[in-house]
Image (cartoon, grey):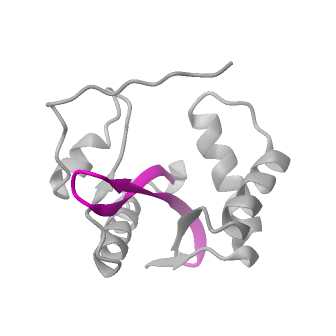
Amino acid sequence: MINIIRAKEEHIPTLIPLLDKYRIFYNQNSDEQEAQRFLEARIKNKDSIIFIAFYDGSPAGFTQLYSSFSTVGLKPIFILNDLYVYNEFRKKGIGEVLLNSAKDYCILLEYKGLALETAINNPAQKLYERLGWKKNTSSLYYFWEAK
């Protein structure tokens, strides 16, 4: 059974290994201390909304949302910045439940919608499209990195 909760300060110890594995997945070095500091700041400052998925009582995955705005739409939006499921829990519907939880939360708050960015070769694209996400083909994404 899949259970989703919204993370609070007391859930940080559960989130630390999830965030660390997520970062490793994206070729970053393991750093649980920095992950802890990052999570503490996000939750303390109310910078993000984090949902944790539990599968039969075990932590299995998470998603993190950040608020932004659509000036054109004159409404707030969420950026679904992070979505991760431990390898051993994949193919059990956890990613789908996390995505739907984010959608439900967006609807509850009457936000315009959710945006996400993913790698071109990410197989999760099929899941996103099956759940009603639309690929933006009308604009380009740019990023400038301060080094």
Please report the residue visible at 74 percent of the width from the left and 52 percent of the height from the top.
Answer: 38
Q: What is the quadrant of residue 77 in the picture?
A: bottom left
- Where, quadrant-wise, is the C terminus in this rendering? top right
- Report the side of 81 relative to 128 (left or right): right
Q: Position of residue 137 (x, y in %)?
A: 15, 31
Please report the residue visible at 31 percent of the width from the left and 75 percent of the height from the top.
Answer: 104
Within the magenta stretch, is there residue 60? Answer: yes
The extreme top residue here reads: 147
- The correct choice, above or below, for 44 with respect to 147 in the image is below
Please report the residue visible at 25 percent of the width from the left and 64 percent of the height from the top.
Answer: 112
- The correct choice, above or below, for 78 with respect to 117 in the image is below
Q: Position of residue 123 (x, y in %)?
A: 31, 37
Main SS, magenta region, reads strand
- Number of dots carrying numbers: 0
Within the magenta stretch, is there residue 69? Answer: yes
Query: Observer-nearest residue: 129 or 71?
Result: 71
Q: Position of residue 78 (x, y in %)?
A: 39, 59
- Where, quadrant-wise, is the N terminus in this rendering? bottom left
- The correct choice, above or below, for 31 with respect to 92 in the image is above
Q: Position of residue 4 (x, y in %)?
A: 48, 76
The extreme right residue here reads: 33
Highlighted range, magenta? 56-84
- The correct choice, above or below, for 92 with respect to 20 in the image is below
Q: What is the quadrant of residue 101 in the picture?
A: bottom left
- Report the side of 67 relative to 20 (left or right): left
